[in-house]
Amino acid sequence: MRPEDQEVPPLQRTSTHRFDVRAGDRFSTLLVMTSNAPDPYPVLVSVFLDYRQVEFRMDGRQGLLHYVEIPPDVDLETPIEVPIEGAGWHDLFVVVFRSPGQHPEAEGSRVPPHLAVGGRRTVVCSGSCTPVPTAPTDLLTGQPVEGHIMNVWAFALFANDSRPPGHRLLLVSDEVCESQYELELWASNPSEEMRDYLVISLMDYRQVVFDSSSVLHLRMPPASQFFVSGRVLAPLTPGMHEFQFISIADPYRDLDKVSFIFVYSVMRSGIRGCGDR
């Protein structure tokens, strides 16, 4: 929300699809969060700029992740500031991780929509506003398949498993005592139109490298799906750690033309760190 709209009724506030700032200035706004929970609701707040997780200032504190307890029945309006490097068009979104202290060991407690992630995108223009002409990441193209295709954006699967993908969701792993952990990304597009989306991988709410990249760009033809095998750095401490893929539809486009303005993750996978370390 724009600070000048703080006293304006929500339905009358200025659009937040795009913000313009002077070159060299920080992006300063109010982050609005609300909860329907009867008690204060814990979340972690993170900001991604041009699809990279960045440090930002929230309520006067600098950091990569900010812990907040949202009061019940209140719209919590908190000032945030994000440094913008370089003139031109920048994609920016805030991600809110719900219940960060929960680490369920039961697989049923991780099945969607449990522990889903939500966020919303905006465009910040610094000085000028020239959209990115081409995607700066390599494209991975889905393969057409026959038969029913699930609407899967980005699920983590157990690797080296011959079962159908819907039967090998990575919900909770065994203990991982190696330096890296192998898993598989499952993506699909059941619609009749081409879809582009980015996939970002996170371990314990921090962006990490998967398949040699911290951002994967998928181009999904109609009725297609895709499997990407890769490795992530394994957790270095015992206990349950949280891994997830986040999906962003139609990257590098004007938000008036995208199919889905929100950032989405359907679940978190629990990966057990080795207790013998």
Image: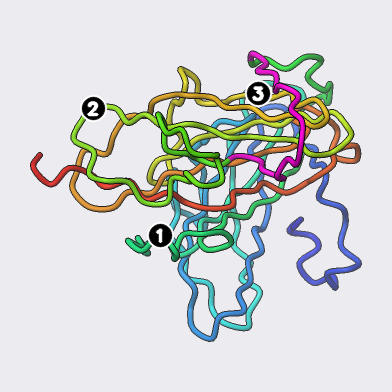
Q: Residue at the location (76% across, 55% down)?
A: 2
Task: Residue 197 in the image: state x and y as whole percent.
Answer: 71, 31
Whole-percent x, y for residue 225 in the image: 68, 30
* Disc number placed over residue 107 in the picture, else none: 1
What's the residue at 23%, 27% (across, down)?
179
Region in magenta: 138-154
Q: Amino acid at mark 1?
A: Glu
Q: Where's residue 247, x and y in %? A: 64, 40
Display colour scheme: rainbow
Q: Is residue 208 visible?
A: yes
Q: Amino acid at mark 2?
A: Ser
Mark 3 or mark 1: which is in front? Answer: 1
Q: Nearer the viewer, residue 15 or 20?
A: 15
Q: Kindly identify which numbered label has been placed on residue 179.
A: 2
Asked whether the viewer can see residue 62, the reply is no
The quadrant the N terminus occupies is: bottom right
Q: Is residue 136 magenta-colored?
A: no
The residue sitting at 84% across, 42% down in the picture is 259
Which numbered tag is attached to residue 217? 3
For numbered disc 2, what is the local secondary structure?
loop
Sequence-earlier tag: 3 or 1: 1
The secondary element bearing badge 3 is classed as: strand
Residue mark closest to the camera, 2 vs 1: 1
Is 188 or 245 nearer to us in this picture? Answer: 188
Q: Quadrant of the C terminus?
A: top left
